[in-house]
Image: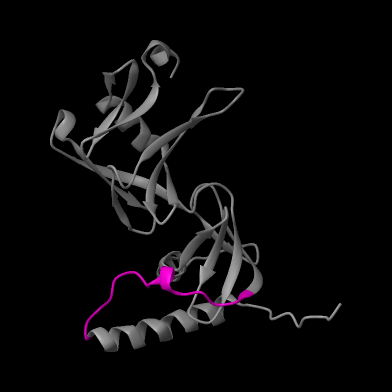
Amino acid sequence: MTAQKTVTPSAEGIAEAIRSAENTDGEKRGKKRGLPPVHLWNPPFCGDLDMRIARDGTWFYLGTPIGRKELVKLFSSILKLEDGKHYLVTPVEKVGITVDDAPFVAVDFQVSGEGRDQVLTFTTQVEDQTVAGPENGIRVERHSETGEPSPYVHVRAGLEALIDRKSFYRLVDLGQDHDGWFGVWSGGEFFPIIPSKELDGL
């Protein structure tokens, strides 16, 4: 078996690569860009990085929380989910990271409209916004032993946000019964939370 040289990725190198790509892309477009086109990048896998996203949305590098919010936002913009594993992707490298639960946390949401016309717009800890609806669903998992709910909303490209507790309580306040389920409407879609008959135990 031929030994393959292992390239050791670093957070600093990834940040520099994505800034360079953003500057180049921005010059081509002539203005400030949106999210990087991660879906178009297919670089070689360069190994796993000692980076972790905790369940509360805190990013860690080498065991230490990343304190610079702009750096966390930069890394979050190049997240990619492939075959159940999370990666940071630049035009030249792809590195694996650890995600304890979901890579984002929905820390707030806004409501417009009422009933079936209601629209819920969630904001994550890195200030991304996602409008719940047919393309961005809300789902609720319940712990097999305790029954405790863990609610999620889709953000983009398979990446989800865990809806924080205070926001989930607000969702419950907006809930309605529909076809035997208690849940919420958004974007013309009904998202079940719990069977109506079990509502008292929520």
Residue 144 coordinates in the image, percent (x, y): 59, 25
Where residue 40 sits, quadrant-wise, is bottom left
The foreground one among 179 and 64 is: 179
Residue 73 coordinates in the image, percent (x, y): 41, 66
Where residue 74 sits, quadrant-wise, is bottom left
Where residue 111 sits, quadrant-wise, is top left
| Residue found at the very far right of the displayed protein | 1
Bounds of the magenta segment: 30-45
Residue 128 within the magenta-colored segment of the rendering: no
Residue 33 within the magenta-colored segment of the rendering: yes
Q: Residue at x 40, y 70 (%)?
A: 70
Q: Is residue 76 left or right of residue 123?
A: right
Q: Residue at x 29, y 71 (%)?
A: 34
Residue 135 coordinates in the image, percent (x, y): 31, 47
Q: Is residue 84 left or right of residue 18?
A: right
Residue 180 coordinates in the image, percent (x, y): 34, 15
- Chief secondary structure of the magenta span? loop
Image: 113 above or below 17: above
Image: 136 above or below 113: below
Q: Quadrant of the C terminus?
A: top left
Q: Residue at x 37, y 33 (%)?
A: 168
